[in-house]
């Protein structure tokens, strides 16, 4: 048990070990920590700007693309799957957030043997069954399949299996 | 300013100093150990055994020119490394590394573990903003990959913790550690109930370990910075100290996650899963005074930081070992592991823990068997046929690839 382990500052008097000293606001040290961490982070990011040399040329300033001149904007379109993943994350995250409050009280109910323990257990089980159904639907509908895009490469999907057609396009078309 | 305020500031400074002082040895250890595992020597010139190499690198990087590409979003580009490093410092605000409430944790608040999860997800902002602001295609891809990866594994990580929290009945870190100092399985008085030793805690611990490797962008989940395809991904365009800050943030978060894993699954600061107070009392009852005092010293407050740092060091070594052993996953494999394996298993583990708490070990065993059978059914009859269909397609490609014309196109 944590209370029974000896206090290393006991020889300094009861002031250090007699009681757990709670600050007026228990979150105060966290705010102090956030302030200290922000100062350190910003200092570290800014210092090299002050200390390092500044000799910029057009070649240095161009974005790195393996030695060739960059073409087009870097802020291009990207696959919708990333957006879908983020949406699913938010959905599942909100679903599991509802369990946090139950987790903090369930142990107490079980130890006291109150009827709430059994009742809340079955309520959560029903909830989890629905959760698994949702998870199963997401997996089954292929929302998380990171295969090649069917819209960009329709010739690669289905045809070869169904119609025994040539699987890939002829060389001339591909080169053009 | 009250004394409580200054004690709180001291506690915060201890964690921040731990991060700042701890990162160079971690980098050195990674480089040396990786070298030995790959049959190389590694950095051994600067200082004894090369120990000062990270310091020398840091000083060099401070004085290097900062190359900022022309079309970057300057403010976001400047801010992104700071956002990436920030969580490494404040994630330890609820970390317990010893028994003394004056020194640890920084703030023993009711939201302890929620704080860890919340702050660990802040790190993704640094990466995605850095990737977006760099005006580089590789960086953008790295940032996007990272976002999808981090949110996927964060979900599984949070759900994996549920079984631990359910058994503890509190989100306080001190309560989680205290629960692990109870008798093992609530039966054996001489042993401690480390969650890694219990069936539900072991499952949660394995899932949490995989997720924390993914959350820190480490091999085999280092796709955001895959050097062979994305040229370092989100930090391609970062140089000088800004690159070093990203680098430092990664290693500091690694160490902090190691510490959190220690608190949640490895019993905090106790060196072995033994109840030192109980053993000490037994020894003194058997008139072995020296043994009694030795045991209470080993499990006592003075040695607590030593054991705690030792466990964190062990977990960091596991990180490096995994990096040296496993190849990088493909992106679809990465997402499959996160969503189809880790997340459902974490949720099932949570349900089984609730069953165990209410109905005991027998019900737990029966439910676990039912779940295992059910999982095999689902995998065998519902999800696998899709995989078989894909396999047939691949087979067909191989057959057709025998013609010379097709082979050319495939290349």
Image: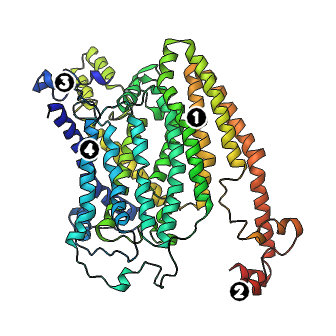
Q: Chain of mark 1?
A: B
Q: Which residue is mark 4?
A: A33
Q: Residue at x 38, y 41 (%)?
A: B260
Q: Secondary structure at mark 3?
A: helix
Callouts 3 and 2 in the same chain? yes
Of circles 1 and 2, the one toward us is: 2
State whether discs 2 and 4 lie on one chain.
Answer: yes
State left or right for residue B313 relative to residue B185.
left
Give the CA separation, mark 3 to mark 1. 39 Å
Q: Residues under labels 2 and 4: Cα distance?
A: 60 Å
Q: Does residue B350 appear to the left or right of B225 in the view shown?
A: right
Camera-nearest residue between B394 and B158: B158
- Kindly report which numbered mark, 4 or 3, lies closer to the viewer in this rendering: 4
Q: Which mark is residue B349?
A: 1
**What's the mark number on residue A175?**
2
* Residue B359 visible somewhere in the drawing: no
Q: Is residue B167 above or below residue B373?
A: above
Q: Residue at x 58, y 22 (%)?
A: B361
Q: Residues within 10 Å of mark 1 (few under 14, many from 20)?
A: many
Residue at 59 percent across and 53 percent down: it is: A85
Q: Chain of mark 4?
A: A
Instruction: Choose mark 3 or mark 2, whichever is in front.
Output: 2
Which is nearer the eye, A21 or A80?
A: A80
Q: Point out residue B406 in the picture as x, y percentages from the top left corner.
A: 77, 80
Residue B215: x %, y % from top left: 46, 51
Residue A175 seen from this side = yes
Separation of disc 4 and disc 3 at Cα? 24 Å
Q: Which residue is mark 3?
A: A17
């Amino acid at each position: 048990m944590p209370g029974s382990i000896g206090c290393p500052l006991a020889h300094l008097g009861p002031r250090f070990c007699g009681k757990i000293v709670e600050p007026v606001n228990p979150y105060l040290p966290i705010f102090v920590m956030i302030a200290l961490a922000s100062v350190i982070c910003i200092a570290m990011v800014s210092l090299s700007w002050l200390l390092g040399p500044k000799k910029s040329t057009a070649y240095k300033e161009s974005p790195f693309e393996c030695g060739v001149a960059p073409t087009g904007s870097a802020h291009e379109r990207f696959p919708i799957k990333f957006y879908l993943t983020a949406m699913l994350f938010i959905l599942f995250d909100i679903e599991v957030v509802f369990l946090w409050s139950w987790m903090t009280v369930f142990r107490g109910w079980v130890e006291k043997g109150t009827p709430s323990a059994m009742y809340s257990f079955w309520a959560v089980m029903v909830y989890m069954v629905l959760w698994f159904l949702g998870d199963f639907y997401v997996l089954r509908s292929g929302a998380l399949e990171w295969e090649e895009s069917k819209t960009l490469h329709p010739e690669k999907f289905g045809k070869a299996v169904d119609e025994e057609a040539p699987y890939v396009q002829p060389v001339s078309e591909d080169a053009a | 300013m009250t004394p409580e305020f200054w004690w709180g500031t001291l506690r915060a400074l201890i964690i921040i100093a731990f991060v700042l002082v701890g990162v160079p040895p971690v980098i050195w250890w990674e480089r040396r150990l990786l070298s030995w595992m790959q049959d190389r020597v590694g950095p051994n010139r600067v200082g004894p055994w090369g120990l000062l190499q990270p310091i020398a690198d840091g000083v060099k990087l401070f004085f290097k020119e900062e190359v900022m590409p022309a079309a970057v979003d300057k403010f976001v580009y400047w801010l992104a490394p700071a956002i990436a490093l920030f969580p490494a410092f404040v994630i330890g605000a609820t970390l317990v590394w010893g028994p003394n409430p004056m020194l640890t944790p920084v703030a023993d608040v009711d939201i302890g573990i929620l704080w860890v999860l919340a702050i660990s997800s802040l790190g993704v902002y640094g990466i995605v903003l850095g990737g977006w602001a760099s005006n580089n295609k590789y960086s953008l891809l790295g940032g996007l990959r990272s976002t999808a990866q981090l949110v996927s594994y964060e979900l599984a990580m949070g759900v994996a913790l549920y079984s631990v929290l359910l058994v503890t009945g509190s989100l306080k870190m001190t309560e989680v550690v205290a629960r692990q100092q109870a008798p093992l399985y609530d039966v054996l008085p001489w042993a401690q109930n480390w969650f890694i030793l219990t069936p539900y805690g072991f499952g949660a611990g394995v899932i949490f370990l995989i997720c924390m490797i993914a959350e820190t962008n480490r091999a085999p989940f280092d796709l955001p910075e895959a050097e062979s395809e994305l040229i370092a991904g989100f930090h391609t365009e970062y140089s000088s100290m800004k690159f070093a800050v990203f680098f430092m943030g990664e290693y500091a978060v690694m160490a902090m996650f190691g510490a959190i894993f220690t608190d949640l699954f490895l019993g905090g600061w106790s060196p072995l899963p033994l109840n030192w107070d109980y053993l000490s009392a037994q020894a003194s009852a058997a008139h072995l005074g020296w043994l009694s005092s030795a045991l209470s010293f080993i499990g006592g407050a003075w040695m607590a930081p030593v054991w705690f740092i030792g466990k964190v060091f062990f977990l960091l070594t596991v990180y490096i070992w995994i990096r040296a052993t496993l190849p990088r996953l493909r992106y679809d494999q990465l997402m499959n592991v996160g969503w189809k394996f880790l997340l459902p298993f974490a949720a099932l583990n949570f349900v089984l823990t609730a069953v165990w708490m209410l109905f005991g070990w027998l019900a737990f065993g029966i439910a676990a068997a039912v779940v295992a059978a059910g999982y095999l059914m689902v995998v065998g009859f519902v999800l696998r046929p899709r995989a078989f269909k894909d396999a047939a397609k691949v087979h067909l490609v191989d057959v057709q690839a025998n013609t010379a014309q097709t082979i050319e196109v495939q290349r």
